[in-house]
């Protein structure tokens, strides 16, 4: 086993530390994690690092040395078992959530992804903001509830969850992060990271998800992609992201035009670079196909004919229609039910199926009293999954003294 260790050259006491000067280069489409290590070393010396620029990001590289580490027989066996467990993944599925600040273009980007994935017919009339199906959402023009959909790209099913951007609906974002392995962090090319961007990114990093940064609205005349990438990278550092998380992929896109690319000045005619980044950067879902059934209920919907519908990701086992299951609650009590109907998300609809394999997101009907946070498990040997934790709602107010020159006067 070999470990790579970063080494910094000693600083001379008589001179101030300087970074190597390099020729400016185009904005990198992938931010190096080694710059994070260098910043941590500089902070440890009590120095303030300069703001990262296009060239300095590529220059902040650390040399590496090899350190020999001996492994015992037990540790080797443990490593082999972990490797075997990691190999149990579904290569034909990716689960992602799209997170961002309000009005940064999440829903518009999902619309473009659905259209280019040939979800709709060529002669079909498709309105804007397809995912906002709720009446209140259409009236106010915002996303309130998280929505599930899926597309197919190169034989891989991509489950997409569109999330709200307003801080009032942050609980919706926290819940759906249990169903995915990665996120698309959409950032406006002019505004950059905003308060809700910080909140949703913090939650994604706490879950250990892979992040693909999408600099959206790149076609705006006032776009400043270099500032947005640098600000987003600094936000990762402030949130104590790991080296792997800081090595994020950057995609420049225009959701309204349906274009994306690895460079802001060279966009493709479609969203192909974004789809490729999802397949390349988002991990495959880890599964235990032969294990006992486990599905955490992350969201619920209501249908006039089918009643309450439980939505969640199947973590282990195989769920079948007509199967008798055990419903485990947070207080370690259980009750029993039967799956009357089973659905998966295909394109823009729920498609009925006979069975679902672990790793996919599905919808379950038949359990009338199902609640969010409960676990649908195997009837005989199923165990509950950890419950969903959502931050308590808070209200912030600022009070200040009236310092106006008109204070106490009637105007």
Image: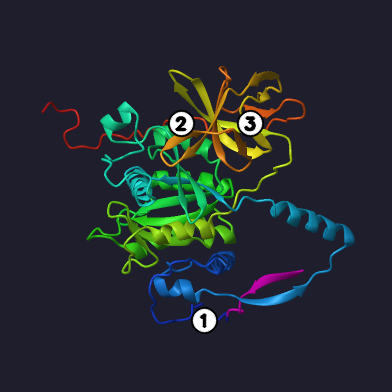
Is residue 101 placed above or below 243 in the rendered structure? Answer: above
- The quarter of the picture where residue 320 lies is top right
Labels 2 & 3 near each other (Cβ < 8 A): no
User: Measured along the vertical axis of the image, is residue 60 above or below residue 294?
Assistant: below
Tell me, yes or no, if residue 386 can be seen here. no
Q: Identify the residue at horizontal 47%, vertical 56% (top origin).
A: 212
Task: Judge the density around disc 1: few (<14), some (14-19), many (≥20) Cα neighbours within 10 Å.
Answer: few
Q: Is residue 10 magenta?
A: yes
Left or right of 117, for residue 338 = right
In the image, taking residue 352 as reference, residue 127 lies left or right, namely left
Which residue lies under the disc numbered 3? 320
Is residue 223 in view from this perspective? Answer: yes
Residue matched to label 1: 15
- Residue 142 location (% of width, % of height): 32, 36
Q: Secondary structure at mark 3?
A: strand
Give the residue pinned by disc 2. Answer: 394
Kindly state the secondary structure of the residue where label 1 is placed.
loop
Q: Which residues are magenta?
A: 1-11
Give the CA separation, mark 2 to mark 1: 48 Å
């Amino acid at each position: 086993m070999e470990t790579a260790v970063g080494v910094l050259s000693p600083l001379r006491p008589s001179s101030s530390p300087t970074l190597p000067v390099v020729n400016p280069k185009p904005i990198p489409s992938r931010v190096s994690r080694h710059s994070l290590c260098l910043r941590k070393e500089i902070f440890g010396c009590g120095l303030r690092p300069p703001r990262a620029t296009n060239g300095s990001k590529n220059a902040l590289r650390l040399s590496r040395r090899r350190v020999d580490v001996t492994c015992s027989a037990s540790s080797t066996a443990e490593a082999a078992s972990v490797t075997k467990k990691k190999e149990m993944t579904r290569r034909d599925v990716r689960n992602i959530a799209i997170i961002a600040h309000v009005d940064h273009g999440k829903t518009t980007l999902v619309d473009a992804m659905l259209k280019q994935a040939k979800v709709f017919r060529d002669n079909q009339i498709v309105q804007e903001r397809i995912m906002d199906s709720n009446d209140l959402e259409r009236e106010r023009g915002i996303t309130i509830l998280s929505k599930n959909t899926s597309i197919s790209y190169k034989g891989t099913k991509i489950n997409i969850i569109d999330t709200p951007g307003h801080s009032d609906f942050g609980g919706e974002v926290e819940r759906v992060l249990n169903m995915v392995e990665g996120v698309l962090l959409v950032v406006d090319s002019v505004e950059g990271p905003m308060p809700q961007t910080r909140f949703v990114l913090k939650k994604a990093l706490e879950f250990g998800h892979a992040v693909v940064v999408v600099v959206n609205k790149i076609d705006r005349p006032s776009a400043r992609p270099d500032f947005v990438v640098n600000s987003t990278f600094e936000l990762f550092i402030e949130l104590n992201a790991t080296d792997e998380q800081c090595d994020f992929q950057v995609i420049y896109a225009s959701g309204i035009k349906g274009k994306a690319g690895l460079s802001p000045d060279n966009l493709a005619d479609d969203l192909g670079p974004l789809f490729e980044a999802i397949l390349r950067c988002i991990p495959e879902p880890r599964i235990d196909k032969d294990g006992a059934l486990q599905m955490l209920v992350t969201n619920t919907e209501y249908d006039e004919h089918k009643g309450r519908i439980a939505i969640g990701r199947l973590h282990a086992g195989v769920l079948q229609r007509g199967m008798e299951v055990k419903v485990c609650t947070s207080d370690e009590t259980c009750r029993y039910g039967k799956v009357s109907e089973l659905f998966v998300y295909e394109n823009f609809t729920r498609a009925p199926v006979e069975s679902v394999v672990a790793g996919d997101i599905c919808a379950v009907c038949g359990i009338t009293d199902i609640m969010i946070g409960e676990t649908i498990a195997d009837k005989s040997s199923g165990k509950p999954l950890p419950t969903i934790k959502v931050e308590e709602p808070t209200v912030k107010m600022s009070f200040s003294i009236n310092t106006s020159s008109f204070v106490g006067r009637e105007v």
